[in-house]
Amino acid sequence: PVPTLAAGPAGLTLEGVALADIAARFGTPTYVYSRAALTGAYQAYQKALGMRKALVCYAVKANSSLGILSVFAKLGAGFDIVSGGELARVLAAGGDPGKVIFSGVGKSVDEMRFALETGIGCFNVESAAELDRLNDVATQLGKRAPIAFRVNPDVNPNTHPYISTGLRGNKFGVAFTEALDLYRKAARMPAIEISGIDCHIGSQLLDPAPMAEAAGKILGLVDQLAREGIHLDHIDLGGGLGIRYRDEEPPTPTDYLKPLLACFEGRSEALCFEPGRSLVGNAGLLLTRIEYLKPGVEKNFAIIDAAMNDLARPALYDAWHEIVAVAPRELPATRYEVVGPICESGDFLGHDRDLSVAPGDLLAILSAGAYGMTMSSNYNTRPRAAEVLVDGDTVHVIRERETLEHLLKGERPLP
Ligand code: LLP
């Protein structure tokens, strides 16, 4: 699944660098990203969009490290954020605030103020109460807030229930049936400037059909708005395109976008997309070392130095990530439970994996670029992993490994 990963005589290499060298220089566990893979994924969207007036707004939540954001900023991307913290990251990475869209159901007054002062491109408003609050905050600042409503198109994206977001029963967006009234209301508000419409139906989508269905519904609404004299500058169709973790066959951006582009053919609005996983997921891996091999009565365990605090997806969603030996041994493969050191049975990275390895060997957990580092924690007081970005023969440390000082900072025992 990682396009720039290859097998060399000294084991796996990413672009021009041996993973074993990275482990020797920076230790493990370490997230390792490929700049070429990030760039390639972004360019696949650009190619799919062709000459269409469109903006790719990378969903920062997938991986918000400054090094990753700076790659996309240099490529001219916009950013989809969900907090003031993510906005601060985009600014620190050199992103253009005018290309930032702000999603999320719970924007605080402080976050709105920060975003208005920064001059972001658009707020994706998710409720009537949020619209009122935004109008108040913008009025206080003497500004007008550009908005789109995130409309819930009520389509089933056929993905994991935790990451489907466009069904009527989800907390996201405003109901399709209420959208028209909300636009009318917004049009009368002095500090609100209607800019677009938005929808996002879910993540890890493998079938373009539900998205095309949602786009059709959105288009109907856009036409209805136009008849009332409410004209939009942009139509945001969210993120969600899936990636291959194991044997999934996700459409390419070209195939995924084709029906959407067809739906909006010849229209003057700019199109906007919010992809996260499909830009970073297969551009990164988690490099880890085997601490112990522990044969068991029922199962054998490979105990590694990465854990659910580093990569939560297996424990949280039962997600499958490919795990490969960096330099497989000339040994018959043994079937292992690949587990971390955390004191929970849910702390596994992979079940039933056949590996030819010895204690001390390196493993690469693949497709870990999205929702890996951003969902990591300090559970069990484990400092978070380092992150490095490979660019040809060069390795950039984009985040130093956390230390215990970082972890204890700000805490104090009772006097
Ligand atoms: N836009 C909005 C409003 C979103 O809520 C999301 C993801 C995206 C864009 C980006 O979606 P993507 O292109 O990455 O599918 N932690 C889960 C995924 C949660 C996705 C949440 N929203 C996982 O590890 O699978």
Image (spheres, rainbow, N blue to C red):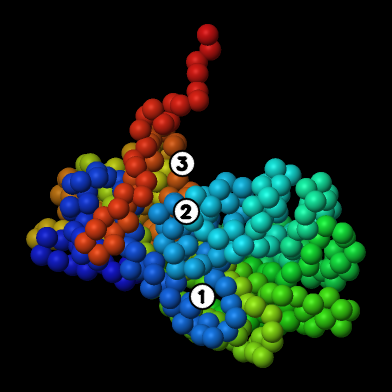
Q: Quadrant of ligand 1?
A: bottom right
Q: Amino acid at mark 3?
A: Ser
Is 142 placed left or right of 235 in the picture? right
Name the side, left or right, on which 201 lies relative to 366: right
Q: Are marks 3 and 1 in contact (CB under 8 Å)?
A: no
Q: CA distance from mark 3 to mark 1?
A: 29 Å
Question: Any mark on residue 93, and which?
Answer: 2
Mark 2 vs 1, N-terminal side: 2
Between marks 2 and 1 in the image, the one whose residue lies nearer the viewer: 2
- The amino acid on which the numbered mark 1 sits, given as a three-letter code, is Leu
Counting residues from the N terminus, which is met first, the one under dot 2 or under dot 3?
2
Residue sitting at x 62%, y 50% = 83
Q: Dot 1, how many residues are within 10 Å of its Cα: few (below 14), some (14-19), or many (20+)? A: many
The kind of secondary structure element at disc 2 is: loop
**Residue projecting furthest to the front:** 142
Residue located 87% across and 79% down the image: 229
- Residue 26 to residue 220: above or below: above
Amino acid type, mark 2? Ala
**Residue holding disc 3:** 377
SS for callout 3 = loop
The residue at the point 81 percent across, 46 percent down is: 140
Q: Which label belongs to residue 206?
A: 1
Q: CA distance from mark 2 to mark 3?
A: 22 Å
Q: Classify residue 282 as left or right of residue 396.
A: right
Circle on res. 305: none
Classed neighbour count for the residue bearing mark 3: other residues with Cα under 10 Å, few (<14), some (14–19), many (≥20)? some
Q: How many marks?
A: 3
Task: Give the camera-side residue of 133 and 335.
Answer: 133
- x, y percent for residue 172: 70, 60
